[in-house]
Image (tube, grey):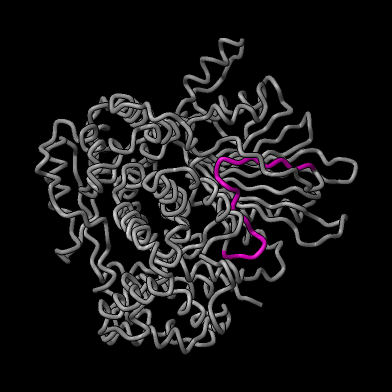
Amino acid sequence: MCGIAGLIGRITEGNRQAVRLMSAALAHRGPNGEGFFETSPEGDGNGVLLAHRRLSVLDLSNAAAQPMTDGARPEHTLVFNGEIYNYVDLRSRLQDQGQTFSSSGDTEVLLRALAVHGTDALSSLRGMFAVAHWDGSRKTLNLSRDPLGIKPLYICRNPDPNPDREWSILFASEVRAVLAARLLNAPRLSRTATRNFIWNGFVPGPETIVEGVELLPAGNLITFDLKGNSGPLHAFSKAPSRDAPKTATVQDVRRTLQESVSLHLASDVPLGVFLSGGIDSSSVANMAARASTTRVETFTLTFAEREYDEGPFAREIARAIGTHHSEVMLTEQSFISTLDEAMESMDQPTFDGLNSFYISRAVRSAGITVALLGAGGDELFGGYTTFRDLPRLQAIASMLRAVPKSARLALARGIARVAQRKSDAVGSQARWAKLPSMMACSDDTVQLYQLAYALFLPEYQSALLGESGEQPSGAIGLPNELRKELEKESEGRSALAAIANLEQRLFLGQRILRDTDAASMAVSLETRLPLVDTEVVDVISRLPDDIRFFPLRRKQVLRDIGLEGLDPALFERKKSGFQMPFDRWIRSNLGAEMDGTMRNRQLCRDIGLDGETVEHLWQSFQSGRSKVFWSRVWALYVLLRWCDRHAIKLH
């Protein structure tokens, strides 16, 4: 696990300095080593500059250092962030083809595969990766990213159209590293990304919060020449086909899950497991303990607030599995005292990333370099309420299809008014308040899904953004290209399979994975996700729906496989999900820390928010008179503070 950065442009001292600055900004991702590479300038003076920050995990020797140039084919050079879990198999296949290797890790295998087979080799990789591959024989730079989007890669094209410009392309593992190059003149906030953040609480790719910086879509390759010109994106990996026969069995899932956990245990440094006490993390910990030759270390974040504390459950489960278990208590005061450090871990503003930071920091301080996570099970097996609620709403809408649309909407509005009769306009932003809008779009699964997760109703979003009327026509908090992809992927799928795909592509792919990457790498911890694996996703997508999803929300298949040997009674409790006590803390001392930012109308204006509306929302939350969820005010606070810290404004 590492950080990578680079530039296409003139081979000048100024550009070398820009790449060094990007590398320095990525130091937390790779504290064990730093390396640089540059090509010889071509006739017009252009070339490629690459940087790599190393967190040593596999093959700790200098033989695995990067940038790595292929010994047999020196025209090929690579910088790479991530892990290739099937590298042993790939190396064996390459050796059968006459290839030899001088290191024991995955980097040289990846480089040789690209040198021998070109970019076709990407489709054979099983792992998490962001790769920059210089092909000197073709004078091209290939940038690629893993199919499930575990590792990020950001690209910035120089907006200057002058063909004699000093640089044309920047890329890096983090948005902040691109900004650190200091080559963007007065970087600006993206208005559309801000609008999408207000909807989601994070910025869905390929957009980022900074105008002109884009996230390379997962499973895609883009190739640049030395002038910075590129062809179209090439998807070397696609979501499992909706037409694939549903012929997989539970035994197929068992074999693939166990194989994935075993592969994810490969490490030459200390390794642990995050254990929240839920089905997903407990399954990973249990399978890891069965596959490991040494005793597994598990870690749980605990709270003094009992209603949020999963510690007692995790402790009992760890005892049953037989792990060496550690608990880390996070109090309100310790959270506040380290808030600056935690906020600094955010590469982009997000309302849901700090829990990963605190558990990651605790695990890293215990001497652990690699940690396995249980994320992904809810998306694969239907653990969220969306799997129950959205198909139910669609079924009701279908039964009422004969009723005139105006009457259906009037009924929905009446139900919403009764259900939230004690809420004012500020508090009426979730749950029942969304019913009329959701009923109106029940045929559109993507829009329905987005409304279910929206932090605010579209009308209130417009008020926060100081816009008259509703958001632009068709806006549902997603970039147009992403929305079209998701709509196409939803066609022809069952309701549950369509929701599973949306949960995996959006909630997991655009939010959890990026939050986890930024938060864990901020403390130099590599996190691995055995349930977020291409082979696992493929096999489970071929399970019949009645086996995969039912009974709804129980994740029975994962229980049967992952919790083997454990008492089922340990897991017969209400599903709550891992939450920090934000609601209580914001109504206490944390709220005092937030107050000045939430009332700063100039800061609101700088990023395109209506300060009066933001302050009113904040006052409504503090008073407790309105049913305002903590996530709404916290999301705005994070956005304001991130933009202030990085001096990013609309103009």
Q: Residue furthest front?
A: 402
Say above or below: 29 vs 543.
Answer: below
Which residues lie in the magenta part? 209-225
* Residue 119: x %, y % from top left: 65, 30
Q: Residue drawn at (29%, 69%), measured in percent from left and top?
A: 582
* Residue 481: x %, y % from top left: 61, 54
Is residue 221 rendered magenta in the image?
yes
Q: Residue drawn at (20%, 48%), measured in percent from left and top?
A: 277
* Residue 265: x %, y % from top left: 35, 31
Please give left or right for residue 347 compared with residue 357 in the image. Answer: right
The quarter of the image holding the C terminus is bottom right
Residue 337 in view of the camera: yes
Considering depth in this image, is 154 or 37 the residue closer to the camera?
154
* Residue 369: x %, y % from top left: 37, 41
Q: Residue drawn at (39%, 48%), measured in percent from left and top?
A: 495
Q: How many marks?
A: 0
Please give left or right for residue 635 compared with residue 99 in the image. Answer: left
Residue 518 in view of the camera: no
Considering depth in this image, is 336 or 24 the residue closer to the camera?
336
Is residue 328 rendered magenta in the image?
no
Considering depth in this image, is 100 or 259 the residue closer to the camera?
259
Q: Residue furthest right?
A: 43
Please give left or right for residue 644 compared with residue 380 in the image. Answer: right
Quarter-wise, where is residue 448 in the image? Answer: bottom left
